[in-house]
Image (cartoon, grey):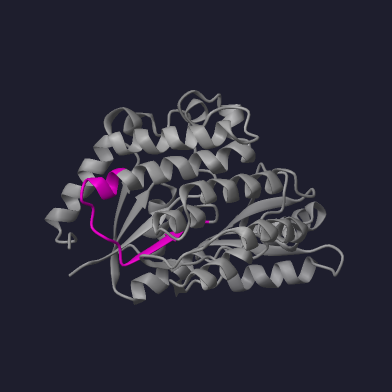
Amino acid sequence: MAKLACLFPGQGSQSVGMGKDLYENCAEAKTLLDQFDQFSKASSMQAAITTLCFDGPDTELKRTINTQPTIMAVSLAAWACYVQKGGPKPHFVAGHSLGEISALAACGTLSNEDAFKLVLKRASLMENCPKGAMAAVLKLSASALKEVVDAVSTSEKQVVIANLNTHEQLVISGDPDKVSEACAKVKEKGGKAIPLPVGGAFHSPLMHEASVTFSELLKETNFGDAKYRVVQNFDAKAHQKGDELKANLDKQMENAVRWYESIEYMVSQGVDTFVEIGPGTVLTGLVKKIDANVRVFNINDKASLEATLENLKLEGALT
């Protein structure tokens, strides 16, 4: 019998119009997104979740403070439809950065309201974090890139590997000058470095103060045990106990997203089918680069929901 993992996307998967088709065609999605509208109206957000998702504008949707809660809301709306339509229970779930909080809500570890509060605080802290820089690095191994970042870093100014997306798609993060220096060395080694349009150094030591503030809210938030095993970014291992899930999430903001290790861990446990649940297809693309032998599907509208469920049924993944 095939083993299944459900994946939840992170920042960068947003697009104007996301979630609208599900809202109009799945009662569970409408109920959930209406609920998130109420959360947003009672918060510091300047626009309702559905307004940002359906109408944008793109400039507002791309702002971290709006991107993170909207992606989570659409991901959980897609999950609600998947569950209602009889989608098979996953053996594992995982989320990329922001997506880990979506995964925790899908598992029942967090209530939707608590997940929203955590994501809104996280997004606010990240949007207002100290100046930093990030760059995507291609065609260079993690070990070779670590040599580069170690060589350019000092005790006062650091750059680190922030995202291990695939074996040849990595992201560095840190002090702007040191990121530029690292990019030059990457090119010298035959790699390719692409500066990213962000103002912060996410998943780096520059996020320490933000992480401490986020921890204060985490301490006040109830984490239940998860219905499914959650493979977390911090250690690329599976956890179900609420206290372990909270402790690892607490470390996520200033540590690397170990994505390819997470996927390889799940494959080593017998997973051969991955379903990305939420806007875009970023994660399915990454998974296929990590392991070309696994099956990947995505759910972001009515058509993809129906096609995914039909394919899972035909391939014997339904339990």
Q: Which residue appears at 57% of the width and 31% of the height?
A: 41
Q: Position of residue 72 (x, y in %)?
A: 48, 45
The C terminus - image quarter: bottom left
Q: Position of residue 264 (x, y in %)?
A: 41, 71
Asked where in the image residue 89 lies, by quadrant, the reply is: bottom left
Q: Position of residue 160 (x, y in %)?
A: 70, 64
Which segment did they paint magenta? 81-96
Q: Name the residue furthest right.
A: 156
Question: Taking the image as drawn, is residue 13 in sight?
Answer: no
Q: Which residue appears at 79% of the width and 50% of the height?
A: 130
Q: Is residue 183 left or right of residue 313?
A: right
The question of residue 122 being in magenta is answered with no
Between 73 and 59, the residue placed more toward the observer is 73
Question: Taking the image as drawn, is residue 23 in sight?
Answer: yes
Q: Which residue appears at 49% of the width and 42% of the height?
A: 71
Between 97 and 157, the residue placed more toward the observer is 97
Q: Name the residue furthest bottom.
A: 268
Q: Which residue appears at 23% of the width and 52% of the height?
A: 87
Q: Is residue 34 left or right of residue 244?
A: left
Q: Is residue 315 left or right of residue 4?
A: left
Q: Is residue 251 left or right of residue 22?
A: right
Relative to 31, residue 269 above or below: below
Relative to 172, residue 114 above or below: above
Relative to 134, residue 142 above or below: below
Asked where in the image residue 280 lies, by quadrant, the reply is: top left
The N terminus - image quarter: bottom left
Q: Position of residue 199 (x, y in %)?
A: 72, 44
Between 10 and 106, the residue placed more toward the observer is 106
